[in-house]
Image (cartoon, rainbow, N blue to C red):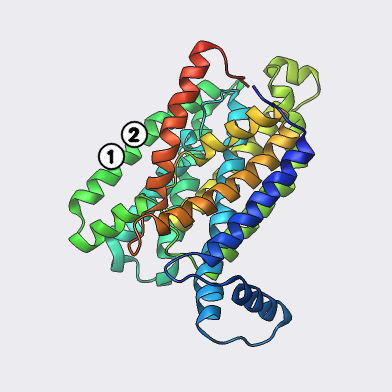
Amino acid sequence: MFQTRPLAFHCLLLLLLLGSFILSLSLGSMTVATGSLVEVLLGRLSGDVVTGTADMVIWQIRMPRVCLSILVGACLAMSGAMVQGLFRNPLADPSLIGVSGGAAVGAALAIVLGGSWSWFAPDWNLPLFAFMGGALVTALVYRLGVGPLGTSVATMLLAGVAINAMTSACISYLATTAEDVRLRNLVYWLMGSFNVASWQKVSWVAPFALLSLLMIPFLWKGLNALLLGESEARHLGIQVERLRRRVIILAALAVGVSVASVGVIGFVGLVVPHIVRLMLGPDHRWLLTGSALLGAALLSLADLAARLVVEPLELPVGVLTAALGAPFFLFLVVQRRRGQMYGV
């Protein structure tokens, strides 16, 4: 296992994030020169009215997409790091507590039923139902895991597995009863994509990403103590039950709002914390912030690759993350079996 200095590694992550930001704004079906990019950005920041094709492509199309990919990547990666620390399992993933499955069911209802929910604002149908589905399923899993002796992690995991199976069955049923157009929309949404990005969605996801970052100082000590075991953490003065509630609620909010905005994007919450852990070790003070930066940069680059790989068509970014994340996951399983990987 190779480890480096936390501050130096965070500086490298910031440079990677900045590079992915510039590349994502510049490249695509229309390549924007560096001079035009700087001119548009400086004009917008100064409040000047900038017109032209470059401004429309950069500010109205690519900028909200890049910002949304950065925010979603940070949310998914931070949630993965928190859930892995809470369950003390490096192979855990936020989807284990049912957030992604519940959000997928909510979105499937909004897509398949369509006009039946016309009393909502049309633009908010899908994200609202997806968020509600994720929140309800998470609340149910947590309620099932709470017993007379406190919260049982094993019971929560089993409940999450069972409810994920139920949500898969619900989605399959809705898919078989959907019309052709709505079925295509449902399948495409389940694969995850940023082609529906807008400033409205950016403004919706941003507060949850900021909340996750602001909560890091209140979580990292408790998660570090949990590495020693629950009883040891309690002896160190950590209120384990309160820590569990905070982590589960925060992960559910961050993942739920991400899935509600862009669809199901897998393996980010699993793979990114592992990469940061291998570089920095298990200290959550650095692991959480490093995961946020690396998740933001990698998902931004993944979205850029999804736009360029099969140009002029667009590959769903969830397909790309799954294609790259699955082999890495198998590598982690093999390394863990051989006892060569650092475990939390």
Q: What secondary structure is found at the residue carrying circle 2? A: helix
Determine whether, in the image, residue 258 is placed left or right of residue 306. right
What's the CA distance linking mark 2 and mark 1?
Answer: 6 Å
Residue at the outermost top position: 338
Q: Residue at x 61, y 86 (%)?
A: 50
| Residue bearing the label numbered 1 | 169
Write down the quadrant of residue 185 in the picture.
bottom left
Residue 54 image position (x, y, % from top left): 53, 79
Q: Which amino acid, mark 1?
A: Ala
Q: Residue at x 79, y 17 (%)?
A: 235
| Residue bearing the label numbered 2 | 165
Q: Is residue 215 visible?
A: no
Q: Is residue 38 above or below residue 186?
A: below
Q: Nearer the viewer, residue 223 or 31?
A: 31
Quadrant housing the N terminus: top right
Q: Is residue 77 visible?
A: yes
Q: Residue at x 42, y 59 (%)?
A: 307
Determine whether, in the image, residue 205 is placed left or right of residue 212. left
Residue 148 image position (x, y, % from top left): 59, 22
Residue 24 image position (x, y, % from top left): 54, 61
Q: Residue at x 45, y 53 (%)?
A: 305
Q: Is residue 88 above or below residue 165?
A: above
Q: Are marks 2 and 1 in contact (CB under 8 Å)?
A: yes
How many residues crowd mark 1 within 10 Å: few (<14), some (14–19), many (20+)?
Answer: few
